[in-house]
Image: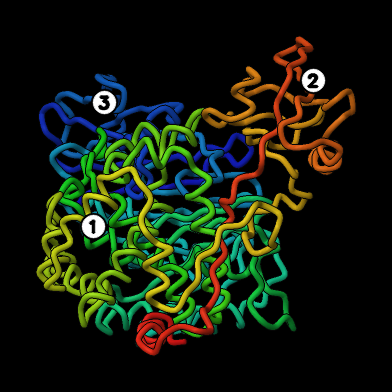
Amino acid sequence: MIEYSVRLADLNRHHFEIQCHVRDPDREQRFTMPSWIPGSYLLREYARHIVSIRAEENGQVVEIKKVSKSTWSCRNAGPLLTVTIEVFALDRSVRGAYLDGRRGFFNGTCLFLSPEGREEEPVQVRLERPVDLRCKHWRVATAMTSKTIDDAGFGTYSASNYDELIDHPIEISDFTDTQFEAAGAPHRLVMAGRHQADLPRIAKDLTQLCQAHIDFFGGAPPFHGYCFLGLAVGEGYGGLEHRSSSSLIFCRDYLPKIGEIGVSLDYQRFLSLCSHEYFHTWNVKRIKPQAFTPYRLDRRNHTRLMWVFEGITSYYQDLMLLRSHLIEPEAYLEGLGRLLTRVYRTPGRFRQSIAEASFDAWDKLYKPEANSSNATVSYYSKGALVALALDLTIRKESSTNLDRVMGELWKRFGKEGIGIGENEFEILSQEITGIDLVDFFELGVRGKKDLPLEELMSEFGVILEFHKAGSVDTSGLSRGEPEPAFDLGVQYRSHPKGLELTSIVDDGPGEHAALNSGDVLIAIDGFQVNGRSLAKRLARFEVGDTVPVTVFRDDELLEFQIMLAEVAKDNCVLSFDEEASVTALQRRKAWLGS
């Protein structure tokens, strides 16, 4: 057994202290730190946060030597080798470790060295109760199996091996929480950070949502209990899946307060986040590509199937809200319209397929740059549209649907712990449905053209229309400011001096005017602009007019001439067709229940 102890060593310096005890180490015992965390496909090199390391045997110092970026070696240690590290923890994201006077949180990839050759041995972790008076009300929340713990959760936990050890994030703070059951399994909702949320209401909604997910995959959850670890903040949004828990970060204003009724767009975003990460309990944590069986945590693990795991999950995240009766069909269509709009506003969809996007995740998706929207596409958002088109195609041409395909994936691969080969999803889809889907996958997965969604959705009594931005208010993409009447071919964000240009659209007015990403737009036609005044400044002109724009490029004031273009019709709006055929209505009812 490998034993660890975790101490909240210094809250002000943000230091955790972790000891790793190894009995009967190898003559040359090596220790490694993961380079990445499963679920977030970027080499983050967690070893860089280690600020000190030492080794001892029976109180005597043992030499420990760094031999690579994330590997250390000890030679000729005695029967019990102890390696102690201090880790700097000030990453508030769901992927990192964090410690200050108000909260502690960590993922195992950030804190636990792995003794090479001992990865499959059972593990025991002791969480020491902090002595700092600021922590007197702190408790522990985690899905890791507890062995001997006190009322606050400090004490000893266990895991079957290193892989399980790093798959249980731990929250340590004065959080609020509530519990509920789904399919007889205990669930816990933990909320760290300041908030005024109606936790019983959220727990009730999550009960319905989790039950819908469990029913989808066959009615028995693949865990003994589940924990949502949430952090409410002023700004932030994201999540990371684990085998029996998820880490979530979200805006506290998304949460419903006591007495509020209905599901606002903000609350729907929170529920969608929970739904997405919960679906991953099956799809990616257990139904995995071969490239992840096992995870190789010291290098990139390439696969062209990330669209299957993130795209299909993104498709079902809101569909599950509908199926669990948390939102109405109209709200579902509005959300689908927002998704379509995001994709249609990404020129990079014509440059990169979702198979290529999946393979390049390690170097492109998680490393966005000024030209990303022109050169890449998200396997999350476009992957969701491919999943939508696949589901509708299967429903239209057979008596089954994508649900059945996912169910078979779970039975044949997830339950059995077998990784999916690069072509097996496509082969299984055709086997289950009896449909020739070769052309579909060539277009949707390896192709770089738009799917015929307008035609396909009409077969289900749904109308897809394209409007100019700002002409309708259902895109959900407004910055909270009036939309300009013209297209400048730029993306921007607020800046103290005006508008910082974050991206220049290929072959657009901004590119033709020689504007650069990073320029700060301060004036149009000699008048100062910001997010609220941009539309007003442009309202005096006509399409085709050439207008002087003034920018700061670094510290230099420059002026350019830009020709105003017509706003593209890329705002997607979905609605029910009141004149749909009986067949279309039957298909729609089977799909949406409406």
Coordinates of residue 25 in the picture (x, y in percent): 15, 36
Whether residues under marks 2 and 1 lie with C-beta atoms below 8 angstroms apart, the answer is no
Please name the residue that numbered disc 2 is placed on: 550
Q: Quadrant of residue 245?
A: bottom left
With respect to residue 178, does 358 lie above or below? above
In the picture as drawn, the residue positioned furthest to the right comes out as 527
Residue 473 shows up from this direction: yes
Please name the residue that numbered disc 3 is placed on: 72
Q: Nearer the viewer, residue 121 or 167?
A: 167
Residue 270 shows up from this direction: no
421 horizontally vs 569: left or right: left
Which residue occupies 67% across, 77% down?
198
Which residue occupies 42% across, 30% down?
50
For badge 2, the amino acid type reads Thr
Q: Nearer the viewer, residue 523 or 498?
A: 523
Q: Which mark is residue 440?
A: 1
Coordinates of residue 197 in the picture (x, y in percent): 68, 72
30 horizontally vs 364: left or right: left
